[in-house]
Image (cartoon, rainbow, N blue to C red):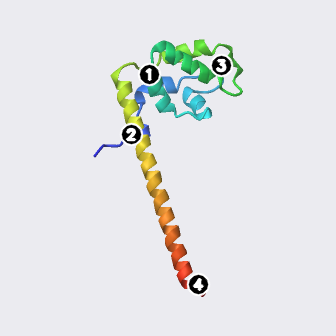
């Protein structure tokens, strides 16, 4: 059985990156959330990419930020500064795998809840039909 950790315990090595400011947006975490991107998973992914590729990817995300003209002026420079805050190596790979495991586990829980809701609905429907006079 795998030990599953909560998101709050994961990715602390990404704190310097995730809490760094981006233009008018208070943090990378906030910017990624505005773009509907999972912050810790994206940080782990960027940490595993070659530096140039990571900078290009983050540059495109920063450029896509709505209502943030300062970030749009020089997104590549901002991205390079932020990518330098990411850890490199095996630790970020371990965290990325753990984050993927947690995400997969949450999908299983959602499926189980959905199955239970369907089961309860079918049971209640069968009981209602059994009591309805024909």
Q: Which residue lies at the image location 51% right of the left edge and 32% below the top edge?
A: 39
Kind of element beneath mark 3: helix
Kind of element beneath mark 1: helix
Q: Nearer the viewer, mark 4 or mark 1?
A: 4
Choose between 103 and 11: the one closer to the eye. 103
Kind of element beneath mark 4: loop
Residue corresponding to mark 1? 47
- Name the N-terminal-most of marks 4 and 1: 1
Residue corresponding to mark 4? 132
Corner quadrant of residue 60 = top right
Q: Classify 10 Å Cα crowding around label 2: few (below 14), some (14-19), many (20 and above).
A: some
Q: Nearer the viewer, mark 2 or mark 3?
A: 2
Choose between 27 and 56: the one closer to the eye. 56
Residue corresponding to mark 2? 101
Q: Which residue lies at the image location 52% right of the left edge and 27% below the top edge?
A: 19
Kind of element beneath mark 2: helix
- Name the N-terminal-most of marks 3 and 4: 3
- Name the N-terminal-most of marks 2 and 3: 3
Q: For the residues marked 3 and 4, what is the alpha-carbon distance in whole angstroms? A: 64 Å
Residue corresponding to mark 3? 71
Q: For the residues marked 2 and 3, what is the alpha-carbon distance in whole angstroms? A: 33 Å
In x, y percent, where is residue 80? 54, 13
Say whether marks 1 and 3 touch (CB < 8 Å): no
In x, y percent, where is residue 62? 61, 22
- Name the N-terminal-most of marks 2 and 1: 1
């Amino acid at each position: 059985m795998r030990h599953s950790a909560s998101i709050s315990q994961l990715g602390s090595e990404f704190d310097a990156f995730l809490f760094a400011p981006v233009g008018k947006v208070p943090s990378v975490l906030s910017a990624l959330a505005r773009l509907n991107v999972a912050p810790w998973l994206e940080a782990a992914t960027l940490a595993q990419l070659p530096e140039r590729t990571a900078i290009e990817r983050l540059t495109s995300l920063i450029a896509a930020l709505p209502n943030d003209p300062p970030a749009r002026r020089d997104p590549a420079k901002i991205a390079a500064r932020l990518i330098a805050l990411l850890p490199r190596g095996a630790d970020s790979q371990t965290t990325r795998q753990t984050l993927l495991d947690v995400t997969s586990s949450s999908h299983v829980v959602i499926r189980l809840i959905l199955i239970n809701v369907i089961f309860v609905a079918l049971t209640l429907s069968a009981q209602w039909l059994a009591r309805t006079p024909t």
